[in-house]
Amino acid sequence: MEFAELIRTPRVDNVVLHRPFYPAVEGTLCLTGHHLILSSRQDNTEELWLLHSNIDAIDKRFVGPLGTIIIKCKDFRIIQLDIPGMEECLNIASSIEALSTLDSITLMYPFFYRPMFEVIEDGWHSFLPEQEFELYSSATSEWRLSYVNKEFAVCPSYPPIVIVPKSIDDEALRKVATFRHGGRFPVLSYYHKKNGMVIMRSGQPLTGTNGRRCKEDEKLINATLRAGKRGYIIDTRSLTVAQQARAKGGGFEQEAHYPQWRRIHKSIERYHILQESLIKLVEACNDQTHNMDRWLSKLEASNWLTHIKEILTTACLAAQCIDREGASILIHGTEGTDSTLQVTSLAQIILEPRSRTIRGFEALIEREWLQAGHPFQQRCAQSAYCNSKQKWESPVFLLFLDCVWQILRQFPCSFEFNENFLIMLFEHAYASQFGTFLGNNESERCKLKLQQKTMSLWSWVNRPSELRKFTSPLFEANNLVIWPSVAPQSLHLWEGIFLRWNRSSKYLDEAYEEMVNIIEYNKELQAKVNILRRQLAELETEDGMQESP
């Protein structure tokens, strides 16, 4: 298929662009295979370059011969184009609709993008499982790399290489895979070097109504326990939902077969419930007519902050089991690709200082989201504005980033990255020139040959010129466990995401710049103090030598 077939009118003059925080500008609108471009050809006026894949929905309005297209973006921005001529307006609208809903992944922009920057590091090879395993292998010899899923035959949503207990062979893993949803047998998610406790994750056990069991599964998860120790299974579903899953062939671990494990149910919502919550929240944030009571009631009715609280509470529970109880844990919901990954990732941010650095957090995204099989292509297909909702769309990753922001806000000095880093990840998960978030799992990415045909997001982010934008000036390495508050008073609406197109951040940006300047000046003064102290110590030493006979 040629893009030209989808573009009915490639160019229109005298189009007026309205967008947040900029004056209206008149210019020429051009449509390419992947971008909507508006150029005014005036000095000091920024061009608009908008990826078609960032367009969530469009509305059309007509007043006489003038047509207006309202473009609603996946990053929650709303842009208005005033187009002279009804036919041109209809042609542009139908072209945008066709180009923003391409079925084939290989027609998307990452397959056509060619970087204008020098590639210093190949991001596709920055966070390989073998490298991550080396970090653990120095502390323990009880785990091994398994290549049982080398051809993605055992579990299509797992990577080719996983970390499992050394005492469990590959044949046993194959049997366990048939007992777990989607073949997602328990694998290592995190090893706590302080006490040797671990977080494992998996899909639900397929016990069904007959109480089916699997001896190899029991042996696998028991292999993570120390002598005389108990473990915890954290099920991210309510007991009612887990019991309902048994009728469909799923279920949960029976106490009789897992006597050393205590099961805890935590209810974390998923799928359309989260999507509806996001839609309500964005709608409330975009309505500027609310009085205080109505705004607060709409914010509460969205339940967004309630979902944040549920996820953070479960992550804190997981971290407490590891650090304070000295107990290993297994986490799963149904598939183990959504709420499970939210909890395992956030628990690591609480427990592991490396996860609070830029490269450590990138490694976490790779390991616990991309390689772990979170279906980005499905979950991020649409955002808060699209009307044609599919059952698999859900802001799971955005909720995770929001939870990270809540912790960052409470512990601003413990994170090497700033809020802009999290916003950038949100934007690229929904629309990007990079191939990192394409596909639903490693198997799909392998078939698409993303490593050979697209550029990794990390290749761009980890260049020094970009890293400076994402590095927090407040960062001071903190090797302690951090315990975020999940009290309602401690959780805030993430204005940097949900209100950034509704009110200017000019004064906040100026305050941030001033803070950076103060910190830099303080460092300069501290360096001068250190030099003067050294000089004083040298002078005192010289005086002491002269006074001695």
Image (cartoon, helix red, strand yellow):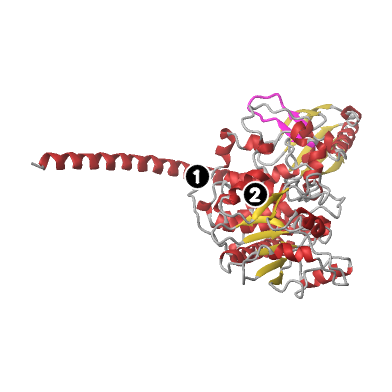
Q: Is residue 228 left or right of residue 381?
A: left
Using residue 76 as the reference point, say whether residue 513 is left or right of it: left
Location of the C terminus by quadrant is top left
Q: Quadrant of residue 396?
A: bottom right
- What segment carries the magenta color? 35-52
> At 67% from the left edge and 48% from the top edge, which residue is drawn?
365
- Near mark 1 (Cα within 10 A), the count class, few <14, some 14-19 or many ≥20, is some
- Residue 34 seen in render: yes
What's the amino acid at mark 1?
Pro
Query: Disc 1 versus disc 2: distance between alpha carbons?
Result: 22 Å
Is there any visible trace of residue 403 in the rendered image?
Answer: no
Q: Which residue is mark 2?
A: 364
Which residue lies under the disc numbered 1?
473
Give the mark nearer the N terminus: 1 vs 2: 2
Q: Quadrant of the N terminus?
A: top right
Q: Residue at x 81, y 46 (%)?
A: 152
* Type of the residue with mark 2: Leu
